[in-house]
């Protein structure tokens, strides 16, 4: 039965692909007039280059050649928009944000991994979760979290000093930043410790959640960096384009199954080592998320509904308990926030911290100037650690962090899908392939749009020419 159902899903997905192939190569589209780079592959289009983890140069090249609006090719020639035009971005992300939704593959993968959390919901359910979570991301809450950040980074500092106490040696900063980021979100987000950050801890010494999250990035890199050539390499069952099909056309279908026990029964019987490994990773992450939420529920009961904890999930659960029935999140949604927050915060935070430290190492004069600012500020504070307001008021620290995130954003591209036919206005005329100029684009329903964060952050018309040098940081 499971085999027949899997075959049915695959046949359906392939039928959709065939229909898309006919549509892309036979029918006309308003996007045909938009210039863009040629596809490098009939099957994968430009997808591999756009989402290659080493693809910075490709992005800079197409931004320079085609400007702020272009067309790229997706699977089997699908027409995709790639843009960072300011006016178009405003309409997509602000004015018409509920028309341009997250990509189905993104939602499907997040739902598969993390359940019904913020990263796996759309529409009214997403708005309800955002409403409940917004207060815990306020400046007031950040002030309360600062002592936790100091405690975690102090443990990191001690471990690295221990590692180099006898002689200078290479330090795997990305490894340490990943562990630190997970511990930071664990402590501030859940009041839970994932990692002691003790020096020399290898993968066997790490918390099972940490190992599972790391394993997920290895067996399913598509979710994080979209390097198609590596997807499913561990199982040897799929190549890049097949993985793209699975993520875009199979998972969105299977996620709609309304019977969890049936889905689990099918997964347990799919003849794939990759699927079984992914199942085991999800099980570990889900079980730990459930344990964290149950522990917090018990603490709330023991303390009369208010355990006084300041972490994100504790605050969320207290607010949820007192919310009106129509605004209240289900237990599954609360559990989903644990895995969603952990995954989202760990990868982006570790990437940003590693890049900042790398640039500081490459530009010692910037490092020295930053160190002088921090030492002077701490001295003026009587030798005490700086609180949140004092930290954010330091101009050079602020410049180093902001400029690094601007030029090297952890997420270079966001994806949206148009849910109805739309007219997208542009801030400057676009020269079409026919040589005419247009000031807006007709975007057909179902069009995938790549929003270039990198392009918006380094747009020469807004920022000037990019200079990846120390003088840029000093400016």
Image (cartoon, helix red, strand yellow):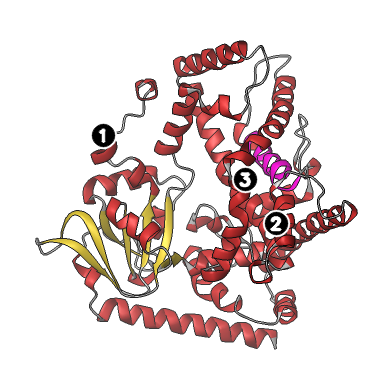
Q: Reply above or below: 271 against 184.
A: below
Res 319 label = 2
Towards the viewer: 422 or 404: 422
Q: Reply above or below: 88 against 311.
A: below
Disc 3 designates what residue?
346
* Main SS, magenta residues: helix
Mark toward the start of the polypeptide (3 vs 1): 3
Task: Find the residue positioned furthest to the right.
Answer: 302
Query: Which secondary structure lies at badge 2?
Result: helix
Q: Residue at x 50, y 22 (%)?
A: 394
**Quick check: marks 3 and 1 in contact, CB under 8 Å?**
no
Query: Which secondary structure lies at badge 1?
Result: loop
Q: What x and y, as percent, mark residue 187?
A: 73, 41
Res 464 label = 1
Q: Reply above or below: 144 against 305.
A: above
Q: Residue at x 83, y 54 (%)?
A: 300
Using the numbered discs, state the Cα–Cα distance from disc 1 to disc 2 in whole angstroms.
46 Å
Q: Residues within 10 Å of mark 1 (few under 14, many from 20)?
A: few
């Amino acid at each position: 039965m499971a085999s027949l159902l899997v075959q049915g899903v695959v046949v359906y997905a392939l039928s959709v692909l065939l229909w898309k192939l006919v549509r892309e190569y036979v029918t006309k589209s308003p996007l045909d007039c938009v210039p863009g780079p040629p596809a490098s592959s009939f099957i994968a289009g430009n997808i591999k280059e756009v989402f290659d983890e080493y693809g910075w140069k490709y992005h800079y090249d197409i931004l320079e050649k085609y400007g702020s609006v272009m067309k790229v090719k997706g699977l089997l020639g699908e027409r995709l928009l790639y843009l960072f035009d300011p006016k178009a971005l405003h309409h997509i992300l602000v004015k018409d944000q509920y028309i341009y939704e997250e990509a189905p593959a993104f939602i499907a993968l997040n739902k598969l991994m993390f359940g019904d959390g913020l990263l796996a919901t759309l529409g009214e359910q997403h708005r309800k979760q955002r409403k409940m979570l917004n207060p815990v991301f306020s400046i007031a809450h950040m002030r309360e979290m600062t002592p936790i950040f100091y405690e975690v980074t102090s443990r990191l500092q001690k471990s690295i000093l221990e590692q180099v106490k006898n002689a200078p040696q290479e330090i795997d900063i990305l490894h340490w930043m990943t562990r630190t980021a997970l511990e930071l979100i664990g402590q501030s987000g859940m009041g839970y410790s994932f990692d002691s950050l003790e020096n020399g801890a290898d993968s066997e010494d790490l918390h099972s959640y940490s190992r599972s999250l790391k394993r997920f990035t290895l067996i399913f890199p598509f979710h994080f960096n979209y390097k198609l050539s590596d997807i499913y390499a561990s199982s040897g069952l799929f190549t890049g384009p097949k993985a793209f099909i699975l993520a875009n056309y199979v998972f969105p279908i299977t996620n709609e199954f309304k019977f969890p026990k049936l889905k689990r029964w099918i997964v347990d019987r799919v003849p794939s080592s990759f699927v079984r490994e992914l199942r085991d990773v999800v099980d570990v992450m889900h079980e730990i998320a459930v344990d964290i939420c149950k522990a917090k529920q018990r603490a709330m009961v023991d303390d009369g509904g208010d355990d006084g904890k300041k972490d994100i999930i504790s605050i969320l659960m207290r607010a949820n308990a007192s919310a009106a029935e129509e605004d209240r999140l289900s237990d599954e949604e609360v559990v989903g926030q644990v895995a969603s927050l952990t995954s989202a915060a760990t990868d982006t935070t570790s990437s940003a911290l590693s890049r900042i430290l790398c640039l500081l190492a490459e530009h010692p004069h910037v490092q020295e100037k930053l160190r002088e600012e921090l030492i002077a500020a701490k001295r003026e504070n009587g030798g005490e650690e700086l609180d949140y307001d004092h930290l954010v008021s330091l101009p050079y620290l602020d410049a180093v962090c902001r400029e690094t995130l601007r030029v090297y954003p952890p997420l270079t591209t966001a994806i949206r899908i148009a849910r109805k036919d739309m007219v997208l206005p542009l801030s400057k005329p676009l020269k079409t392939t026919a040589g005419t100029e247009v000031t807006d684009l007709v975007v057909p329903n179902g069009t995938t749009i790549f929003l270039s964060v990198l392009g918006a952050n380094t747009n020469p018309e807004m920022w000037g020419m990019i200079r990846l040098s120390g003088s840029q940081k000093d400016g």
